[in-house]
């Protein structure tokens, strides 16, 4: 049953990823909101560690907001923003939903990375830019320069091990052994 739930969470996150990217690219405003809400609500309601998971979602969402806003403010990436000025100077709301969903799926997807911070950094440095490049190919992000992809990789090189640490740290803080 645990394997089945893990597979559902991983697939659910992929659905949210495509809904956010395509929703932003095609300006289908409700798609990211509905899929993100349903996914996060479903995962939170079916977990035994609700408080710990909600803390991880809040921490992961804040991390993503900071990372993407820094990248956006320095013009290393440009999102298809559905936000009016001056709100468009920050991470777009659909990326906030995506980061919250990523954090929500993190324990199920990356439990095998617990205490493997170097591996998490390498994987983040490789697959972070791939995800952003894929988003640019769908039209959710403006085409990214080589420099932009390298900087996205550097941010993910730091963010992924931090997410691993946060993922298992929030569990320990809520449920000390």
Image: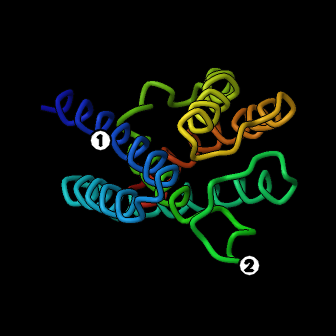
Tell me the quarter of the picture where residue 126 sits.
top right
Viewed as shown, does residue 174 lie left or right of 5? Answer: right
Residue depicted at x 59% and y 42%: 165
Residue depicted at x 57% and y 31%: 134
Viewed as shown, does residue 150 lie left or right of 59? Answer: right
Question: For numbered disc 1, what is the local secondary structure?
Answer: helix
Return the x and y of residue 88 as percentages of the image width and height. Answer: 69, 69
Tag 1 or tag 2, which sits nearer the N-term? 1
Above or below for 43 versus 93: above
Viewed as shown, does residue 79 lie left or right of 11? Answer: right
Look at the image and tell me in which quarter the N terminus lies. Answer: top left
Between the C-alphas of marks 2 and 1, the distance is 32 Å
Return the x and y of residue 142 as percentages of the image width and height. Answer: 69, 44
Residues 84 and 148: in front is 84
The furthest residue to the front: 26
Above or below for 45 versus 101: below
**Label 2 Cα neighbours within 10 Å, binned few <14 / some 14-19 / many ≥20:** few
Question: For numbered disc 2, what is the local secondary structure?
Answer: loop
Return the x and y of residue 133 as percentages of the image width and height. Answer: 64, 31
Residue depicted at x 40% and y 59%: 28
Tell me the quarter of the picture where residue 117 sits.
top right
Residues 139 and 66: in front is 139
User: For mark 2, what is the residue?
Assistant: 86
Above or below for 20 versus 174: above
Return the x and y of residue 26 as percentages of the image width and height. Answer: 46, 52
Q: How many labels does the image show?
A: 2
User: For mark 1, what is the residue?
Assistant: 12
Residue depicted at x 73% and y 38%: 158
**Label 1 Cα neighbours within 10 Å, binned few <14 / some 14-19 / many ≥20:** many
């Amino acid at each position: 049953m645990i394997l089945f739930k893990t597979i559902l969470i991983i697939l659910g996150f992929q659905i949210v990823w495509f809904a956010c990217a395509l929703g932003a690219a095609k300006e289908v405003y409700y798609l990211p909101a509905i899929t993100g809400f349903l996914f996060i609500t479903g995962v939170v309601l079916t977990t035994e560690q609700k408080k710990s998971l909600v803390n991880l979602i809040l921490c992961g969402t804040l991390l993503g907001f900071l990372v993407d806003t820094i990248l956006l403010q320095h013009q290393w990436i440009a999102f298809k923003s559905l936000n009016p000025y001056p709100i468009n100077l920050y991470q777009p709301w659909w990326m906030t939903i995506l980061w919250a969903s990523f954090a929500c799926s993190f324990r199920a997807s990356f439990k095998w990375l617990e205490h493997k911070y170097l591996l998490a950094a390498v994987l983040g440095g490789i697959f972070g830019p791939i995800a952003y490049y894929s988003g640019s190919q769908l039209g959710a992000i403006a085409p990214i320069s080589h420099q932009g992809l390298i900087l996205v990789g550097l941010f993910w090189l730091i963010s992924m091990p931090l997410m691993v640490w946060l993922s298992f740290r929030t569990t320990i803080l809520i449920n000390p052994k």
